[in-house]
Image (cartoon, grey):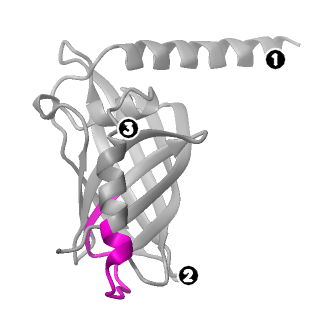
């Protein structure tokens, strides 16, 4: 019985830490956008997504590579919590530009690999700071996506893992990610 109470206390403490962390905006870091994602506070512009989805569907080129520019949406429980532009580069690097205030640092960098099954795995490691510039820990964004037959649509999953300043796991937010390739018109 005491083990259950201790576990409940630990879970409550972790949720409290996350709530406090999400209520404060991070200072000038890519972590801002990931914290906003976890708190579902990011800006989402459905009109941009609709324009880009139409353009990607209209493209007749078949792509077998993820390399290129993408419009992506992150979805948790059926709700889009963030949108971003992602540029997947040859050599396994990626640039993530979320729709957040650029004054807080809205460009993230990642690395990716193709798995033996053909899926693509992406990893971001982000330093997380509070508004006073104090180091709060790290945020790990991971994605696993697959390309459609045309290569113009990607679908998959993502997760955000939050770690405190000592490297201890705090919490995870998971959901789905979808993307449309941005074509030259």
**Percent from the top left, x then y, of residue 67?**
27, 76
Q: Which residues are magenta?
A: 55-71
> Which label's residue is closer to the chain start, 3 or 1?
1
Residue 58 at x, y = what percent?
34, 76
Q: Which mark is residue 4?
A: 1
Of all residues, the one furthest to the left in this rendering is 103
At a point 30% along the width and 68% down the height, the residue shown is 55
Tags 2 and 1 touching, CB below 8 Å: no
Q: Between residue 17 and residue 60, name the one nearer to us.
A: 60
Quarter of the picture containing the N terminus is top right
- Identify the residue at image location x=22%, y=78%: 90
Q: CA distance from mark 3 to mark 2?
A: 27 Å
Q: Secondary structure at mark 3?
A: strand
Q: Judge from the rendering whether residue 98 lies leftward or rightward of residue 54; answer left or right.
A: left
- Give the vertical position of 164 relative to 126 (above or below): above
Q: Which quadrant holds residue 126?
A: top left
Q: Residue furthest right?
A: 1
Q: Between marks 2 and 1, how big is the CA–CA gap?
A: 40 Å
The tag earlier along the polypeptide, 2 or 1, is 1
Q: Residues within 10 Å of mark 3 (few under 14, many from 20)?
A: many
Query: Which residue in the structure is indicated by mark 2?
Result: 117
Q: Which mark is residue 159?
A: none
Q: Quadrant of residue 103?
A: top left
* Residue at mark 3: 139
As drawn, 90 above or below 124: below
Q: Earlier in the sequence, mark 3 or mark 2?
A: 2
Q: Residue 157 or 1: which is nearer the viewer?
A: 157
Report helix, strand or loop for mark 1: helix
């Amino acid at each position: 019985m005491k083990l259950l109470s201790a576990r409940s206390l630990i879970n409550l403490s972790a949720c409290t830490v996350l709530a406090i962390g999400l209520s404060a905006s991070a200072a000038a870091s890519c972590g801002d956008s990931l914290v906003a994602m976890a708190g579902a506070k990011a800006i989402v512009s459905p009109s941009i997504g609709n324009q880009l989805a139409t353009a990607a569907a209209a493209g007749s080129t078949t792509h077998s590579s993820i390399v290129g520019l993408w419009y992506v949406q992150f979805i948790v429980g059926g709700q889009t919590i963030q949108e971003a532009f992602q540029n997947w580069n040859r050599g396994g690097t990626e640039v993530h530009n979320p729709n957040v205030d650029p004054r807080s640092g809205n460009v993230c960098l990642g690395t990716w690999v193709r798995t033996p099954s053909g899926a693509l795995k992406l990893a971001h490691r982000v330093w997380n700071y509070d508004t006073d510039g104090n180091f709060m820990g790290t945020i790990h964004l991971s994605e696993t996506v697959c390309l459609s037959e045309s290569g113009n649509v990607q679908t998959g999953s993502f997760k955000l893992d939050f770690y405190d300043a000592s490297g201890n796991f705090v919490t995870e937010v998971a959901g789905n990610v979808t993307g449309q390739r941005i074509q030259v018109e």
